[in-house]
Image (cartoon, grey):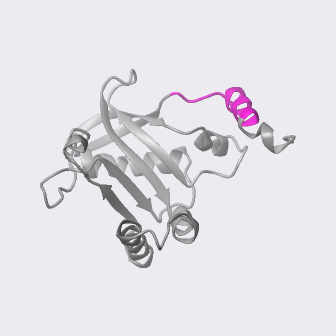
Amino acid sequence: MINVDTLYIHVRHWLFWYGVYGFTNKSCNDEITLFSDKEQNNRLAYFDLLTLPCLIDHLNSELDETDGSSDNAYMEKIQSFIDGDKEIGYSYIYPRDEEDESYQVNHSAPLNEKGLKPTYIYVWSKQVDAWDRESISDHVTILAREFLQRDVENIVFLDIPSYEETKASYEEDYARFGPID
């Protein structure tokens, strides 16, 4: 295990920050990118974080049971995780063709039957119902150990918008729904 002083996190979506600043409920699904440097030149990993309420919502409304084997298999994996004892689980998307092979993750990850690493990793968590900075930091510590073989002392969020920037973005995004109190 490598000891690393700091990992840097970029959260992809504004919805996370809307929840952090109290404009909406906290998000239950966020995408994060991990970097070893604050300049974001050395990307280490990318994860899609989903909480239990988000997974239940996927089962109840987003996934199509009639869509065939891929959605059905994914639904079964989600249900198995929900019913199981694990607090954190993972789902992987592997390359579908030779072109996808160039998008394999460059860190430790389970190989598929063809010996290929995933191109995308979902992180499922029962530890929290919604994401905030503390819960993402806690999960990044786990992910760094699991996939990067690193013990991390500090987690730093990058590109944190100010309250005012977040409010302006929120108002722009939600203006079509009517006045905001």
Q: Is residue 175 left or right of residue 55?
A: right
Q: Is residue 27 left or right of residue 6?
A: right
- Name the chief secondary structure element in magenta: helix
Q: In which quarter of the view is residue 60 placed?
A: bottom right
Q: In the displayed orientation, state which residue is furthest to the left.
A: 115
Query: Is residue 162 part of the magenta span, yes or no?
Result: yes
Query: Is residue 85 part of the magenta span, yes or no?
Result: no
Identify which residue is drawn at 71% across, 44% down. Answer: 22
Q: In the displayed orientation, state which residue is furthest to the bottom.
A: 83
Identify which residue is drawn at 34% across, 60% down. Answer: 91
- Name above or below for residue 109 compared with residue 167: below
Q: Pick the residue in front: 17 or 78.
A: 78
- Name above or below for residue 74 compared with residue 139: below
- Name above or below for residue 159 compared with residue 95: above
Q: Position of residue 149 (x, y in %)?
A: 22, 46
The N terminus is located in which quarter? top left
Magenta segment range?
A: 159-172
Q: In the displayed orientation, state which residue is furthest to the top.
A: 39
Q: Pick the residue in front: 54 or 157.
A: 54
* Residue 105 visible in the current orientation: no
Q: In which quarter of the view is residue 36 placed?
A: top left
Q: Position of residue 147 (x, y in %)?
A: 26, 49
Q: Position of residue 87 (x, y in %)?
A: 40, 67
The total number of labels drawn is 0
Q: Pick the residue in front: 35 or 171.
A: 171
The C terminus is located in which quarter? top right
Q: Pick the residue in front: 96 or 136.
A: 96
Identify which residue is drawn at 55% across, 39% down. Answer: 13
* Residue 27 visible in the current orientation: yes
Q: Is residue 27 left or right of residue 45?
A: right
